[in-house]
Image (tube, rainbow, N blue to C red):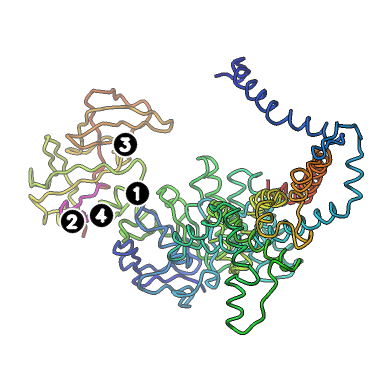
Amino acid sequence: MAGVEIDNVSKAYGSYRIIEGLDLSVADEEFVVLVGPSGCGKTTTLRMIAGLETVTSGTIRIGQRDVTDLRPGLRNCAMVFQNYALYPHMSVAENIGYGMKVRGESRAHVEKAVKEVARVLDLEPYLDRRPKQLSGGQRQRVAIGRAIVRSPDVFLFDEPLSNLDAKLRIEMRTEIKALHRRLAKTIVYVTHDQVEAMTMADRVVVMNKGRIEQAADPISLYERPCNLFVAGFIGAPSMNFIEGEVVARDGGLVFTEASGTALMLPKCREAVYGGHLGKPVVLGVRPDHIARQGAAAGATASMIVKDVEPLGPHTLVIGSVGRFPFTAQMPVGVAAEPDQRFDVPLDLDKAHLFDKATGRVIAA
Amino acid sequence: MMRNDPIKHVFIWPAVLVVLAISIFPLIYSLTTSFLSYRLIPPMPPRVVWLGNYIQLLQEPRFWNAILTTTLIAVTAVGLQYVIGFAVALALNARIPGERLFRVAFLLPMLLAPVAVALVARMMFNPTMGPLNQLLGHFGLVNLPFLTNGRWALACIIAVEVWQWTPFVILMLLAGLQTLPEDIYEAAELENASNWQQFWGITFPMMLPISAAVVFIRLIESYKIMDTVFVMTGGGPGVDTETLTLFAYQEGFKKFNLGYTSALSFLFLIAITIIGVTYLALLRPHLEKRR
């Protein structure tokens, strides 16, 4: 059992506070991805788990063991770095076996373990090569090999795929997920790429300004974001936001926007939204929340098209509703032209309404 | 400018001619002289002796003594410079408080003229009036024959060389240390490698190319040592601290035996070339592994 418990951890550099009272619990064998924009504190959090950064206050436990003040080598964590951090003067085999060598394990044991890891990661033909003789993907596999060879309690990944090209990134994503299933170990993985987070994680932790905004499984995060930040950060293209207010009209509740857009809100949510009548709210609609069979009455937004991007399986219609940017993911062959008006049939059952003042979602 | 633009010749040839005029011509002239018996005092007409000067030199015990002395000074001084220099560079690289002050203080000796340093050192090591022996006397210890005993004099010259040129080694190694990526040390920390293991497993091998260059530069420079020895001991006592350059100076500018001195210079050049080539040949396998 080796989960990670972060209890009320803060980190400050002088008077500048990076992380403030962070609480996070990672279960044994769980794959948790910390995601967020640059400077949100995700890498600092990972480095604090590894012991490469000291904590200003709070406690970190790995498998019930308080490791807050332990040096990195005693935490039994293995880390894969963004720039691989391979020893350039050592061969692939020496890189993978270095950790075992410094712990004084026998040469035969090290060689056996290195060969086994090389077999798993398909690195056998490269064992005698040096890192600079390898491609980016091969280097990353060596870095992973170095991490898995000594069977640590926790794996820490610091944006390991950010230096790879798009195709290789997808391949490595699959490999890392397969590795997690095979090794059944706890993984804490940091990325700024929300697609990476959504595709790999058991649970995604969205961070912003040193705080956790929301921690949930990928689908919950996508379908039920708790605030504007998470709603905007998760999903590509990101969610459309239209500011306006809720008014009572024609026996129901209608979202209205200053330029004249009026959208009938779902009957089932009237009880929840009723409390926000006349207050400034933000309507969040994902680009793919389109009514495929045509819009219900009062569920059509009229946008001015700026550009049309055919992507193959679907077409993005990019423009604005009133003064708010709006992207709609439409079927191939949609009749939309730049500088023309285009009516988007929305599936408002999937839309979200946020309190503009607090940024929090309005939900039961 | 394109690679095959003929304008490049306009820039290259004047430089080549200047190099020929100021370097190759004197070298050839000197080589020619080394085959002559050519004395200014007493003035004698030059006479071709072919390899006579070389044979005479190789049979001269003083020449072999000078080679031995020079090698002893160079190898010991450079060895100490490297070990001390590496230690200080590692300390300065560790971002200790006041590191800037230390850095400037450590680099100062290198900026002083060797003659001035040697003069100060001669006074410091003076067996009767030097402050070092005064200090020893203060503690009731006997005076040491710093510059009047062959072994002590060699040790003093080596000490001055180490004091003056370790800063150069520090400067170069510190520059090298600052280029080493930090994350590989973090990876080693996570592997629970001790500081000593990190030094031998990572720092030292990664610093090998720059170390090789620094030691090579210092070794060649040390073989040319002249001013320090000239001022401190003048090659004495006897010829105990006489280096190759000092021997050449004695022959060329005291006895004005130009043919003999030219031959000595060429033997010196051959010796330095052999040392340099051997050094690089020994290191090549290790350096190529890291290329």
Residue A358's mark?
Answer: 2
Is residue A149 among the parts visible in the rendering? Answer: yes
Q: Which residue is mark 3?
A: A292
- As measured in the structure, the alpha-carbon distance from the residue carrying label 1 to the one carrying label 2 is 19 Å
Amino acid found under the numbered disc labelled 1 = Ile
Residue B38: in magenta span: no
Which quadrant would residue A342 be assigned to in this image? top left
Classify residue A69 as left or right of residue A57: right
Find the residue positioned furthest to the front.
Answer: B42
Q: Residue at x 36, y 60 (%)?
A: A216
Magenta span of residues: A351-361
Find the residue positioned furthest to the bottom.
Answer: B140
Q: Residues within 10 Å of mark 3 (few under 14, many from 20)?
A: few
Q: Residue at x 43, y 67 (%)?
A: A26
- Subunit bearing disc 4: A
The answer to whether the residue labelled 2 contacts the one labelled 4, judged by CB atoms less than 8 Å apart, is yes
Q: Residue at x 60, y 58 (%)?
A: B119
